[in-house]
Amino acid sequence: MWALRGLRNGVVTTRWPSRPDEYAAATRGPAAIRAGRAGAAAAVDAAGLCPTGAISVTGQGGLRVDQGRCILCGRCVTGRPDVFAWSEGPGTAAVTRAGLIMPSEETPEALAEVMTGLRQRTRALRRSVHLRHVDAGSDGSEEWEILALLNPVYDIHRLGMFFTASPRHADILLVTGAGSRGMTGPLRTTYEAMPHPKVVMAVGTDAVSGGIVSPSYATTGGIGGTVPVDVWLPGSPPSPFAIMAGLLLALDRLASGGDHQ
Amino acid sequence: MTTSTDHELAPSALALRDVVARQVAGGRRLADLFGTARGGDLLLTAQVAGPGAMTTLEAVLSAGEASYPAFTPLVSAAFWYERELHDLFGVVPAGHPRLEPLVLPADPRVLPRHAVGPGLFTIPHGPVRSGVMESIEYLVETPGEDIPHLNLRLFYKHRGIEKRLEGVAPADGVLLAERAEGVASVAHAIAYCQALETISGTQVPWRAALVRTLHAELERLACHLDVIVRLADGAGLAVATARFGWHKERVLRLTDQLSGSRFGRGVTVPGGVSAAPRMAPADILAAVGELDRQLSGDIRLLLGTASFLDRLRRTGPLPPARASAHGALGPIGRASGCVEDLRQSRPYAAYGSLGMTVSSRADGDALARLEVRADEVTAAFHLIRQAADELAEASTGSLRADCEPLTGRAPGWAEAPQGELLYDVRVEHGRISRCRIRPASFHNLVLMHEVFAGDILTDFPFIEASFGVSVAGAAR
């Protein structure tokens, strides 16, 4: 009976990233400064607009948005639609923490060096990538979005990615949560149990910066101080497409539509 | 909105304990027990709930008193609450049976033991689990197959949300409330905002109440579908797992289409809602109709799949007498004969004006919990249709009233998908000074200690999934 029912609605699986996907394109990412408006700092009440301090004014009087602190509450976008807008599409992850800051303060050379290092580590993984997840104090929604990757709509098995129960078999560690103190030890142990080469992805604004639940006596304000992070993915929570894009970025398969170059 | 809460101050902690014990013995239930630091004193607050009303009972422990007579020997539901009090405030409930760390980190190498007998050993299961799961540690005490005792340790995920809320502006607090239990963001935002609205005397516009109801029911669908996915996955029903996973994804996408967030975050704000749904009521009805048709067929088939039902029947039974003594909440309580549902007993948002029936069972096993959730899925569709119809009638009108609470204290509540959710919010000079959050997940999870009668290790995933608890909410 179930077998017949499984055929009933045809193929529901997205073909992204090799084909465009309408829902992926419309995925809401962290707030961004509208093109040409980085100089509008004088007119913006940065502290009043952003509850997590993601928006600030630089010494030179320019606007600065740290997407790694954005929890997508949308206050800046509704309060000052002339200056701020949602970033769109799933490609919100960065390979350095500085890469989440707008306008970019990174030199292309430094970025290329990080990317080369990452590429060397992940080259051998090809289409057999094993993922391990650790929750370090999430609000629970990130787990739902990671688990969604296994449903027939996203089905990451088609990209050669699989979840594994043991860190001993894992290539990429997905870490969610603001870094609760209770999880510092278990997170470290899991990381150390993974074989080389290994990659760590901070999934969600909480993992990147501690989010709005930090500062707190019970969190370490993100997981960056506990394990070395390679891919920083903001979002509260990040959508399944954004997580998939972050994984492909780690494997340097994003630009080529999911394939190997 | 009426506040069906009255308030009493007992002369001492001992007197407070005796009042609470008397009321619980008389058929009411302990809904919450927590502390509030006031200067050097500690204010002990107990919430006792009865049919349709809640009483707040309090006593002050003055600066020198580091201990008070424990409630737990008389009121068993206080077991975890007193351990939490001990962890967070350092007071000792004298006479508490097991005062081990619950929400603050302890030495993970120490494995507390409860059961004794030949060949018994402890399997530490967690905090890093197999699969994508939230961090929690189950210490399974077993001679090899059956489980005479189970210990739980929540502290891996404790984030100190209640403390973090202190000093925050009321309008910002909703962002934290939404993240206290991320899969029940809407329920938390509603309960939190309701407390603020009571303090400031704000009347939420009818249209806003409808939008809140709409999102709260979509959230219920998503949470119940999550439980069904986990149960089907545990039984190895690949097609069912895929089908229900697809349905859950569609609910999240519909929520996203309506609000811009897959979890309905940012919808509920103090005084009302932030914006009207981004779909016309007719389109909502069409989308929900199609979902309902496909989903209800799958649920019917699931509830007729014998190999699946065999795993759930008589698994993890919670006897109605035990459920009622503890005051079990939500689908867990309703599957064991505790029929209360806040949407009906203390209506909020638009529930008082919409028709609904509360489903319950008396068997108390994992199957009964699934059946209650299946009924609630049907009821949620019914409520969403009513809310969308009403929204079509009330297509204009305000969505938000002024809500600027300055000083005061009020409770807020909602029937989250996991069960009764309570907030107790205190505002002083326009800032939050204390915000107590009591999710059903915290109140219910302790019952896991008691449902392993005759069950073995392979039943564990079914029992855990059938509880449908959010660890983030329980540990906060």
Image (cartoon, coloured by chain):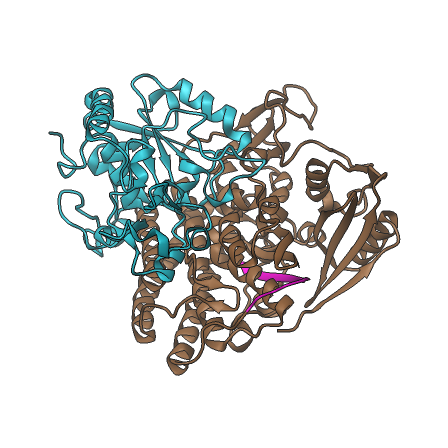
Q: Residue B342 in magenta?
A: no
Q: Where residue A234 sits in the image (x, y, percent)?
A: 35, 42
Q: Residue B407 in magenta?
A: yes
In the drawing, does residue B123 fall left or right of residue A46? right
Nearest to the observer: residue B195 or residue A173: B195
Nearest to the observer: residue A255 or residue B257: A255
Q: Single out the residue that lies furthest toward the left.
A: A261
Residue B58 visible in image: yes
Query: Which stretch appears magenta?
Result: B403-416
Q: Where residue B83 sits in the image (x, y, percent)?
A: 70, 38
Residue B261 visible in image: no
Q: Quadrant of residue A130?
A: top left
Q: Where residue A126 sits in the image (x, y, percent)?
A: 19, 26
> What residue is at 30 percent from the left and 54 percent from the top?
A86
Q: Where residue B154 sits in the image (x, y, percent)?
A: 58, 36
In brown, which chain? B
Q: Colour of chain A?
A: cyan
* Helix, strand or loop for the magenta stretch, by majority: strand
Q: Single out the residue that lies furthest toward the bottom.
A: B393
